[in-house]
Amino acid sequence: MTTYSSNLLIPYLDDNMDNPHLPVNEALRVLDKAIGSKVALAVTGGTTIITDEESRGAYLELTGVLTSNLILQVPARAKQWLVQNKTTGSYTVTVKTATGAGMVVTNDSQLHMVYCDALDCWPVQNSTHGRNRVVLPYGSGITINWAGVDIYDTTLTGNMVISAFTGATDGQLCAMQVRQDATGSRTVGWPPEVRYGTDLTTILLTTTASKMDRVVFQYDAGAGKYDLVSLMRGY
């Protein structure tokens, strides 16, 4: 019976194998794919579970018109990929394992390095940090994942309630650009992970139609809190 390596599923040469060239050839094919191949994935939203064969690729290219947020679910094995999000539509793409929180890959057509540690997916440090801006569609009762994201840009077309912040690394600055629509006077309910100090004790957004506020948090991993560090209003 053929046995396989734990991450790339490369077949081993087992004892008493009649045709040893077969697993050797397959192993070389898998290694070639892991080092240099592109896997093109046409997506529309929802959850796309990539196969073991697709997950062996080095470069995952996502294309298509998103009609909802996309979860790209990868196998729970140690692996890294270059991921390029070429989708259109004002929705997010999150790369994750079945049980992880995952990381957002922005649709800026840049190559993003994603590492899976067999539990969850993480951005490789300095690969995209400082450049990632994600358009956040309006919603209520949403969870915002800061893994690999520096700025979320949203336009309020109703009152927004954010249920939770997740995914940031210790010391990460997490900025939100919050715009009022043509009606104005929309509100945001902030999650329990937000912590206020003595200088900034609340978040009072501008109510003027079409104006934008910048709200910045800094994550404190020891406390598990997103500290409010800046509020600039009325742009």
Image (cartoon, rainbow, N blue to C red):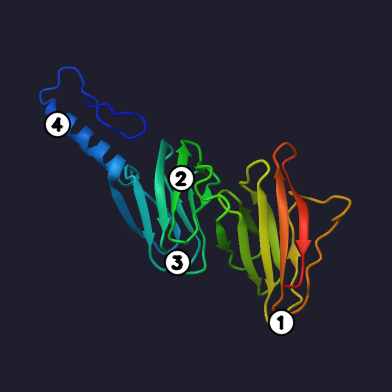
What's the distance in space between the residues labelled 4 and 3, CA to CA? 41 Å
Q: Earlier in the sequence, mark 4 or mark 1?
A: 4
Determine the residue located farthest toward the bottom in the rendered image: 182
| Element marked by disc 3 | loop
State which mark lies toward you, 2 or 1.
2
Label 2 to label 1: alpha-carbon separation: 39 Å
For badge 2, the amino acid type reads: Val
Residue wearing tag 3: 66
Q: Neighbour class for label 4 at 10 Å: few (<14), some, many (≥20)?
A: few
In this view, the mark in front (2 or 4): 2
Instruction: Give residue 61's position: percent from left, percent from top.
Output: 36, 56
Q: Name the residue located 70 percent from the left edge and 45 percent from the top edge.
A: 219
* Residue 114's disc number: 2
Instruction: Inspect the image, locate mark 3, and give the three-letter code of the amino acid beneath it.
Output: Leu
128 to the left or right of 235 = left
Q: Position of residue 202 (x, y in %)?
A: 84, 59
- Residue marked by disc 4: 22
| Mark toward the start of the polypeptide (3 vs 1) | 3
Image marks 2 and 4: residues in contact by CB distance under 8 Å: no
First along the sequence among labels 2 and 4: 4
- Dot 1 corresponds to which residue? 183
Above or below: residue 46 compared with residue 59:
below
**Gap in Å between the C-alphas at discs 4 and 1?**
67 Å
Q: CA distance from mark 3 to mark 2?
A: 21 Å
Do residues under tags 4 and 3 come within 8 Å of each other at their CB atoms? no
